[in-house]
Image: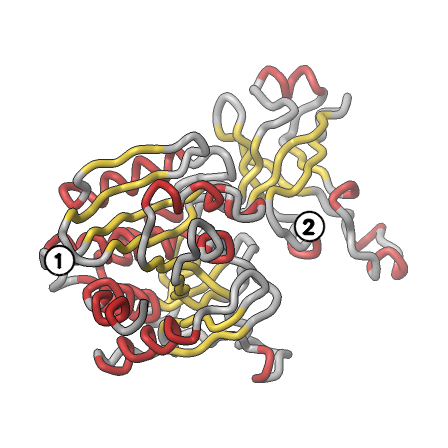
Amino acid sequence: MRTDLSSWLYEGLRDLSLAYGPPGSEDEVVGLILDRLGDAAENHWRDGMGNLFVKIRSGKGPRVMLVAHMDEVSMIVKHVDEDGFLHIAPLGWLDTRVLLGQRVVVHGKRLIEGCIGAKPPHITTQDEQKIVPSFKDLYVDIGASNSEEAASLGVTNGAYVTFPSHFSRVAGTRVLGKSFDDRAGCVSVVAISRLIHEERVDCELYAVFTVQEELGLRGASTIVNQVSPELAVVFECTVAADTPGNPASEYVTRVGKGAAIRVLDSSMLTRRDVVEYLVRQAENNGVPYQLQVMTGSITDAGRIHVQGRGVPTGVISTPCRNLHTPNLILDLRDLECVVRLGYYAVANASSFLSSHV
Ligand SMILES: [Zn+2]
């Protein structure tokens, strides 16, 4: 894997992002993660929330916890009307403006394709075109003629609705797909764990894959007391707004400019010595990085760093365009930067821990 990290990451991201993992139903992702970890996993368990814990190393060195969330922004059926249309509610933060006309997958007895209906422009007034729809205005059409036909397909209240799987290489080293948030983080944690295992780095390492992050960091609420880490690093896929119409001051991060080290978001102000430690690892090892300050987002780190006696926690992210939409674009070179930086952050953790109490 070390000799061919980029193609390993390409395949890992492809397979993990093609899987479905709506909040509360992350089992398919769990299976793929355990397959990819292979013999790097010493043992594993799942807690009462469904979080997956994998022990990677049992050394005498620092106890480090790597974290990524398995769930993806999704929707759920809240009502099937008599004409067979599905009324939906969001599971996670979705902008209804990007949902109109989208294809979706409804998780019934089998996966059933459908679409979020949109009024054709031919019959839409100019005033209507200015209105941002709310979830109560949206519906999913799976072609059912009535609620009985939907029920016969296993589509009733509580059925999950996700964006359809797709993955393609676009220009250069960039890829287009769904659920990179946070399968990019999952594949990063798997890759770092494999590297630490292969290099026999002296540490006690846990890889933790959380559930229900998109509903407000719920899975991460229970993880610290099961591991008691001395250092935690969360791996995310984060906003890159380096697109037409946005001033440079609003980019947050830029695709192709390296791993994003988070300084501030609305759930955590990263300890200054943690930021400096991660920056030092990047600079000492020639890993391109960017510093991220963003008030409009949260990560599992927001829940982790305030648990127990407090946990020094960092966040390293892969920049990604169109976050929380069906069509995300990231650069595989950034993903590789995240993995390399994460590896050095674990391998040199003793230098961080010895520099303060
Ligand atoms: Zn995320």
> Percent from the top left, x then y, of residue 277?
32, 75
| Residue carrying label 1 | 202
Q: Quadrant of residue 285?
A: bottom left
The residue depicted at 57 percent of the width and 41 percent of the height is 104
Task: Tell me the distance, in whole angstroms, between the alpha carbons under discs 2 and 1.
Answer: 51 Å
Is 16 placed left or right of 307 in the picture? left
The residue depicted at 34 percent of the width and 46 percent of the height is 208
The residue depicted at 37 percent of the width and 56 percent of the height is 184
**What's the residue type where badge 1 is placed?**
Asp
Is 240 placed left or right of 330 in the picture? right
Of residue 132 and residue 67, the one placed in the foreground of this image is 67
Badge 2: residue crowd in 10 Å (few <14, some 14–19, many ≥20): some
Q: Nearer the viewer, mark 2 or mark 1?
A: 1
**What's the residue type where badge 2 is placed?**
Leu
**Mark 1 and mark 2 in contact (Cβ < 8 Å)?**
no
- Regarding residue 197, the answer to whether it shows in the image is yes
Q: Earlier in the sequence, mark 2 or mark 1?
A: 2
Of residue 15 and residue 231, the one placed in the foreground of this image is 231
